[in-house]
Image (tube, rainbow, N blue to C red):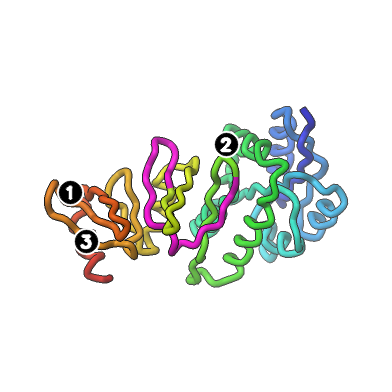
Amino acid sequence: MNLISAVIVEDEIPIAKSLEALLSQSGKINVVGLAHNVDDAYELISSTKPQLVLCDIQLSKAQTGFDLLKQFNNPDFKLIFITAYNHYAIKAFKFNAIDYLLKPVDENELYSAIDRVVKQIGNNVSDLQLQNLLSLMSNSESNKPKKILFKTSEQIRAVDINDIVRLESESNYTSVYLSNNKKLLVSKPLKEYSDLLEDRNFFRAHQSHLVNLDFFELYEKQDGGYIVLKDGTNIPVSKRKKNLLFELLEQL
């Protein structure tokens, strides 16, 4: 198997060296260089043209990984962000289906991310992911994204949030039902999307169901209570969620 070429962009040299050692041990990655600031990273990536870049977000008090990415008009590398916990940044990564690792980097999580990169090498989804991410991060935190990227087994698709009717848990997968009657099956649990969408007029009606209340038609009290959506789908409502549902319906 051909090794994947990679560049590590990390201002803390011990962390960069540790990542280099872990990646080398994976047997799948050839680290072609380390950079510790934006200028050096840009030159290194431009000259070596790696297939993968692992990039810290906060490279100094004045520079970030986003400053680096903005210098590439058409990035053709896969990206894994490395970050200390930042809720807004992580939420942005999830909206745009971009891999990230929290510091301190867990070895197993790193290797899982590498495995995902190996599967993605050869497709052309990086441009879409990074363009959406940079567009989102360039706005203020109050500006909410209009699209979310869903990874299926075959592609990454950009979907208008307003076109999502509902999401349903399928074990460790999630089925996404769209207003054009299409269905996507994505390999992430429902909770991940619940965390992203519940402040966008989506309601977790049940352990297995997240619905867009823009498609709410009526609430039936019989059979324990359930939501009927505009497409005729019946969605059960758990007992502990009924009061919250009624409060949200008052705001529609």
Dividing the picture into quarters, in which one does residue 96 lie? Answer: bottom right
Looking at the picture, which amino acid does disc 2 mark? Glu
Query: Which of pointers 3 and 2 lies earlier in the amino acid sequence?
Result: 2
Q: Is residue 217 above or below residue 168?
A: below
Q: Which SS class for mark 3?
A: strand
Disc 1 vs disc 2: which is toward the camera? Answer: 1
Residue 79, magenta (yes or no) = no
| Residue drawn at x 71%, y 50% as measured from the top left | 10
Compared across the picture, whether 33 is left or right of 141 comes to right
Q: Which mark is residue 218?
A: 3
Disc 3 vs disc 2: which is toward the camera? Answer: 3
Q: Where does the N terminus fall, quadrant-wise?
A: top right
Q: Which residue is mark 1?
A: 239
Residue 166, magenta (yes or no) = yes
Query: What whole-number distance in Å separates the C-alpha atoms at marks 3 and 1?
Result: 17 Å
The magenta stretch spans which residues? 155-175
Query: What whole-number distance in Å separates the C-alpha atoms at marks 1 and 2?
Result: 36 Å
Q: Is residue 64 above or below residue 125?
A: below
Q: Which SS class for mark 1?
A: helix
| Residue drawn at x 65%, y 37% as measured from the top left | 119
Q: Which SS class for mark 2?
A: helix
| Label 2 crowd (10 A; few <14 / some 14-19 / many >=20) | few
Foreground pick, 212 / 72: 212
**What x and y, as percent, mark residue 144?**
49, 67
Q: Which residue is mark 2?
A: 109
Q: Is residue 156 above or below residue 107?
A: below
> Do we see residue 86 in this rendering?
no
CB atoms of marks 3 and 1 within 8 Å? no
Looking at the picture, which amino acid does disc 1 mark? Lys
Foreground pick, 13 / 218: 218
**What x and y, as percent, mark residue 251?**
26, 71
Query: Which of pointers 1 and 2 lies earlier in the amino acid sequence?
Result: 2
